[in-house]
Image (tube, rainbow, N blue to C red):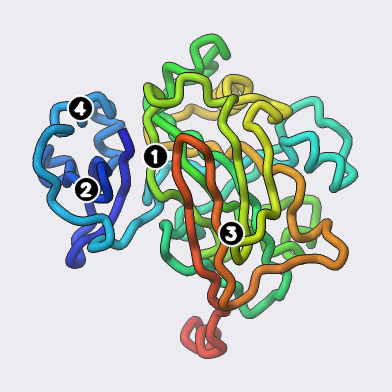
Amino acid sequence: MKIASFTHAGTASYGIVTDRAVIDAGKRLKVPTLKELLTKSSVDELKTLVDQQPDYALDELTLLPTVPNPDKILCIGVNYATHLAESGHPTPPHPMIFTRFANSQVGSGQPLIRPLESERFDYEGEMAVVIGAGGRRIPREAAFSHIAGYACYNDGSIRDWQRHTSQFAPGKNFVGTGGFGPWMVTTDELTDISKQTLITRLNGVEVQKALISDLVFDVPALIAYCSTFTELVPGDVIVTGTTGGVGAYRNPPLWMKGGDVVEIEISGIGILRNPVKDEAPGAAARAA
């Protein structure tokens, strides 16, 4: 199943995407958010709805981040060999982890915001793992049973702020800089996620491409590691890392700017597409 979170006529919900139409699961199940469904039950409960009449055409909806309100977003740095090589980092002995905040994310079709403070807004095509069943110290051999599904992610980076210190968080948490969606595909449709291909396009030009199998730390390793230092709970998101080809290491550098369109495509999942918008100068006055 493909499961998306969305708003329709000002009301937030989630549902099953099929043939460019959506079955409103939140309305039918009386469980308002995908995170709450995963917490109380599982995505298997949605299977009872797959043959019902869709409620909306997909283009009637505003897509939200696949999980709009996760308890945690754990992002993995330099986790593809090609990105390690271009950045000059040695292969780390353990996953490099930083966190994102939920308000830094937007859904597919919504603008990514290049903030006033920087012109160095970089794309990072990635795959996100959505946790379905929580746990602590999950062994890698049990990891896949804890996954609800997979989605596309653009871990947009404000590079100069990311490099203020050795801690990445400031450059990864400007509001509206990360794309998440367009939906989650459940694990029963992707029995071997390592065989899928990740592609990033900027204004229609391919700038990144890799197999998921090129991850330095694979999905089971990441779940095992993260669940050791924190309890994973339903709806948590692990963003698994980007491959080579990011804008910062091109000559000359390639930064996203207002008017651009960036796409993250993962075979078997879909295409996350976001326009890029420059933050309006008046935003600073409103914040003050």
Which picture quadrant has residue 156?
bottom right
> How packed is label 1: few (under 14 Cα within 10 Å), some, or many (20 or more)?
many
SS for callout 2? strand
Badges 4 and 3: C-beta atoms under 8 Å apart? Answer: no
Q: Residue at x 25, y 42 (%)?
A: 18
Residue 288 in picture, x, y percent from top left: 51, 85
Which picture quadrant has residue 132?
top left
Q: Residue at x 28, y 29 (%)?
A: 43
In three-dimensional space, the C-alpha distance between marks 1 and 4, rounded to whole angstroms, equals 15 Å
Tag 3: amino acid: Asn
> How packed is label 3: few (under 14 Cα within 10 Å), some, or many (20 or more)?
many
Q: Does 231 appear above or below 115?
A: above
User: Which label belongs to residue 184?
Assistant: 1
> How packed is label 4: few (under 14 Cα within 10 Å), some, or many (20 or more)?
few
Q: Residue at x 65, y 44 (%)?
A: 98
First of labels 3, 2 by sequence position: 2
First of labels 1, 4 by sequence position: 4
For label 2, the residue is 22
In three-dimensional space, the C-alpha distance between marks 4 and 3, rounded to whole angstroms, equals 35 Å
Residue 255 in picture, x, y percent from top left: 71, 68
Badges 1 and 3: C-beta atoms under 8 Å apart? Answer: no
Between circles 3 and 2, the one closer to the viewer is 2
Tag 2: amino acid: Val
Q: Does 150 appear above or below 24?
A: above
First of labels 4, 3 by sequence position: 4
SS for callout 3? loop
User: Which label belongs to residue 47?
Assistant: 4
For label 3, the residue is 173
First of labels 1, 3 by sequence position: 3
